[in-house]
Amino acid sequence: MEYKGYSSYRQDLLDGTTSVVRVVEELLARIDQQSDLNCFLEVFAPDARARATVIDKKIERGNAGKLAGMVIALKDNLCYQDHKLSASSKILEGFQSLFSATAVQRLLDEDAILIGRTNCDEFAMGSSNEFSAFGPVLNPLDKTRVPGGSSGGSAAAVAAGLCHVALGSDTGGSIRQPASFTGTWGLKPTYGRVSRHGLIAYASSFDQIGPFTQNAEDAARVMEVISGSDAFDSTCSEREVQVFSDEYLDYDRSKPKRFAVLDSVLQHPGLQKEVRETYAQLIDGLREKGHQVDTVEFPYLDELVPIYYLLTTAEASSNLARFDGVHYGYRAEDTQELEEIHKRSRTEGFGPEVKRRIMMGTFVLSAGYYDAYYGKAQKARRMVRDHTEKLLENYDFLLTPTSPHEAFPIGRESSDPTVMYLEDIFTVLANITGLPALSIPFGRGASGLPLGMQLTTSAWQEGNLLGMAEQFKELRDVPKT
Ligand code: GLN
């Protein structure tokens, strides 16, 4: 049965037109048929089946939770109690989680079904899912292409209809860029909106958990459940969580909104022609609807990727120090001395991209270079944040493409880190500033693959992002200018 969003599915469950057991079986069969995509590192089949039976009973009794029967996949950096977890790395070989991430627990408490853990770039470092210790994920829309990264397995699983929703994590674009490459919706919440407890840390001051969905409604519903204060994460905000599923529906789209288009993004030489045209089409469409769209100065575009990589590698070098061959997972064989255990386990356990980042991060934090790199990047981060927040005093949204192009062929960028790092040019701003941003499927690239357009707004306004994005549907057929 085709999935048309959670409310209609829930209605079907209540009417008895379908059951959670049936849906879970269908999805398990589909996951099996499409195993060549390499989306899942593990499918929680027995678990999912057992829970489906229980949840069907709850639905019958009328006491089922808010997400009853929604089938959700988890990126392999989110803890689920008594289940394996690897961050797609060899270094966590054999590791099982002792507790569930707060976001995961909240999904369970609302009767969602967790169907499996999805492949990703090792420790969420990458933009193509090619840096996984368990092989690349194929884009279900064109199997010769990447699904984006780092949450590539989550994006591909939603796009291929192997689950209803998936959770990912976004440190510099890892939800939004794969969403744009697979024609799905991807939301990076405001920093502090969703607890990071139980998310394997990459760069703690950037990381956020968020959903991949097939529509705005499901993103709103999932956000409503996973957001909100948590005693286990002191950076998680205590502010009340809005009812996003009402907020996005009630959002007044007929009232003219103000959009800022960044001049440096418009002029970016790397923009694929089709992306530029689609972007222009969207801008025209918004104007026709009565919205105000202004091109504004944004002088920092070229600085964003360096700021991001200096700060995130620094944080990563510290966060990943705990994987030492003693505390978790993999330990090199035939090692005696402690230093040898650390050295050899890390040498054998980490892949090349993770090693590169640990070394870069250690370098930028080292005594002689700290001020020149880390200290300077911190100051630049503050400048960019102040500038962006100022912009948003006069505008409701920033509008950019999510990525400069559509999904690229497997192997094209993986040998050159500087090329791969430029993938993140439009997405890192939201993480540098902590602001919420959404990638919305809109338009097609040169090979006919989906593109994503990105809306960014002021902190805590995720409902407005989803509400506004709903109007993009009406703009899809605006003729080219
Ligand atoms: N592509 C970016 C990186 O490699 C973003 C990753 C992420 O958001 N986790 O760091």
Image (cartoon, rainbow, N blue to C red):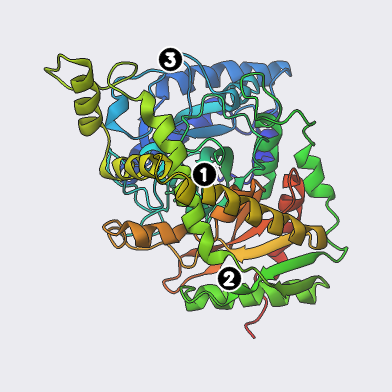
**Residue at 63% of width from left, 52% of height from top?**
438
Q: Would residue 391 be found to the left or right of residue 38 on screen?
A: right
Q: Amino acid at mark 2?
A: Val
Give how far across and how far down residue 123 sits, in percent.
39, 37
* Disc 2 target residue: 265
Kindly report the distance in space between the C-alpha atoms of the residues bearing marks 3 and 2: 45 Å
Res. 392 visible in picture: yes
Element carrying mark 1: loop
Q: Amino acid at mark 1?
A: Thr
Give how far across and how far down residue 273 sits, in percent.
49, 78
Tell me which corner region of the image, top left, top right, bottom left or bottom right, holds residue 34: top left
Tell me which corner region of the image, top left, top right, bottom left or bottom right, holds residue 165: top right
* Disc 1 target residue: 171
Q: Is mark 1 within 8 Å of ligand 1?
A: yes
Q: Quadrant of the N terminus?
A: top right
Kindly report the distance in space between the C-alpha atoms of the residues bearing marks 1 and 3: 26 Å
Label 3: few (<14), some (14–19) or many (≥20) C-alpha neighbours in 10 Å = few
